[in-house]
Image (spheres, rainbow, N blue to C red):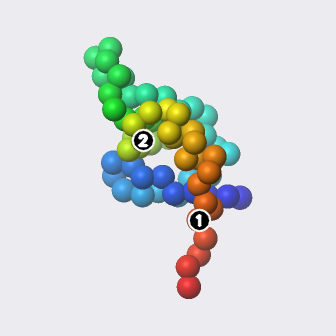
Amino acid sequence: MRFIMIETKQGNVAINPQKITSICPHIIGGKTSKYVFITLGEVTLDTKFTDVESAVDYIQRAPSVSRRS
């Protein structure tokens, strides 16, 4: 199982990218905000990504989280 770090408004979280079900812009009052949501099943993360393309690119290229000595 692979984990990557995602920066959210609440802090950094490690996620399994295979569990991502959707990546979408945050829409408030009919207007797209500057942030992106990542959904993992029933959990939604309010990330600091500014567009869907950047989020997808990062997820594809992100290094795996590993234990540091």
Q: Is residue 27 left or right of residue 17?
A: left
On the image, the x and y values in percent for residue 13 come to: 47, 56
Spot the residue most to the right: 1
Element class at badge 2: loop
Would residue 42 be seen by someone viewing this image from the given angle?
A: no
Q: Counting residues from the N terminus, which is met first, the one under dot 2 or under dot 1? A: 2
Q: Are marks 2 and 1 in contact (CB under 8 Å)?
A: no
On the image, the x and y values in percent for residue 32 come to: 35, 22
On the rendered image, what quadrant is the C terminus found in?
Answer: bottom right
What amino acid does circle 2 point to?
Answer: Phe
Q: Is residue 15 above or below residue 42?
A: below
Spot the residue most to the top: 30
Asked whether 2 or 60 is in front, the reply is: 60
Q: Is residue 23 above or below residue 27?
A: below
| Residue 49: assigned label | 2
On the image, the x and y values in percent for residue 61 come to: 62, 51
Q: How many marks overall?
A: 2
The residue positioned 58% from the left and 47% from the top of the image is 59
Q: Is residue 30 above or below residue 23?
A: above
On the image, the x and y values in percent for residue 33 come to: 32, 28
| Residue 23: assigned label | none
Measured in 3D between alpha carbons, the distance from the residue under mark 2 to the one under mark 1, in whole angstroms, is: 19 Å
Q: Which residue is mark 1?
A: 65
Would residue 32 be seen by someone viewing this image from the given angle?
A: yes
Q: Is residue 40 above or below residue 11?
A: above
The image quadrant that residue 66 belongs to is: bottom right
On the rendered image, what quadrant is the N terminus found in?
Answer: bottom right
Element class at badge 1: loop
What amino acid does circle 1 point to?
Answer: Val
The residue positioned 61% from the left and 60% from the top of the image is 63
Q: Is residue 32 left or right of residue 6?
A: left
Q: Is residue 59 left or right of residue 51?
A: right
